[in-house]
Amino acid sequence: MLRSDRHLRILELVAAHGSADVGRLALLLGVSQATVRRDLQQLSEQRLVERTHGGAVRGGLSLELPLQHRLDQRSPQKLAIARAAADLVPPGAVVGLTGGSTTSEVARLLAERGPVTIVTNAVNIAASMVLHPEVTLIVIGGTARKESYELVGPIAEKTLADHHTDIAFLGVDGISAAHGCTTHDQLEAATDRAFAHHAGSTVVVADHTKLGRTTFAKICPLSAVHTLITDSGASEGELAAIGEAGVRVKVV
């Protein structure tokens, strides 16, 4: 297992359980305890976890995994979701893209196919799109969030109010029939809401781990979402409830 994959698994386990010990992590990851200790030290230096005697607990910054860790895990499910999302975009369309590991894959596929106009507040997407000759790139300004590489806040919302996209793809931290679409940060939620409000149609791209989950800040209710694209690991009950709320559900 690559170091980046180990780090992601460790962060997921600590976030889910509140703590993890070296022995259990070594067993789950199939590596030595010495390797786990080095991994925990590196994550501690990034303030993502706090070292304890024999293991680690949740760090003080946030339970949100920084985008650099999520991008390192290009799972087959996320790639399949991104391909299905790109298939919804006709040539020459104006596409809104919020930040996230899955939306980054959507951008890559659209750029390879072209021509397309991409409106995004994600600096990593903008950086990867700027040299593509078939992409017209519009970058939404704002206050930078290091966790998601997004530009958010009133500046971003004002700019989005002056633009219209044919279709917007939202990356979310949670989507449920009970609470709609949510994310970890209030400013990010408001900016994502502006993307949805000023789009002809809104598509949420979310792997099964996001379904039935609710995080701190509400982006929008399900009534603002036209389509959800997810993978086959999603709960059938949650998918049915989301579909009953009027959202078109596509499982890949």
Image (spheres, rainbow, N blue to C red):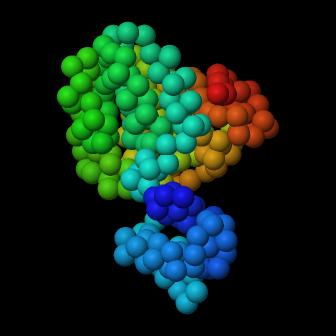
Left or right: where does residue 81 sit relative to residue 192?
right
Q: From this viewpoint, is residue 159 visible?
A: no
- State left or right for residue 5 relative to residue 214: left
Spot occupied by residue 92 in the image (x, y as percentages of width and height): 33, 10
Q: Residue at x 38, y 9 (%)?
A: 91
The count of marks equals 0
Image quarter hosting the N terminus: bottom right
Judged from this view, the residue extending furthest toward the right is 237
In this rendering, the answer to whether 161 lies above or below 27 is: above
Give the residue at the far bottom of this rendering.
53
| Residue 57: x %, y % from top left | 55, 77
Residue under the image location 62 percent in, 73 percent down: 26
Nearer to me, 124 or 183: 124
Residue 175 shown left or right of residue 139 in the figure: right
Image coordinates of residue 66 in percent, x first then y, are 42, 56
**Eyeballing the image, is 6 above or below 154?**
below
Residue at the (55%, 66%) spot, across then down: 10
The residue lying at 30 percent from left, 13 percent from top is 115
Q: Residue furthest top?
A: 91
153 is higher (above) or lower (below) than 125? below
Q: Quadrant of the C terminus?
A: top right
Q: Is residue 226 visible?
A: yes
Q: Is residue 58 above or below residue 90?
A: below
User: Which quadrant would residue 140 be assigned to in this image?
Assistant: top left
Comparing 197 with 47, the one in front is 47
Q: Position of residue 14 (x, y in %)?
A: 58, 69
Name the quadrant containing residue 245.
Answer: top right
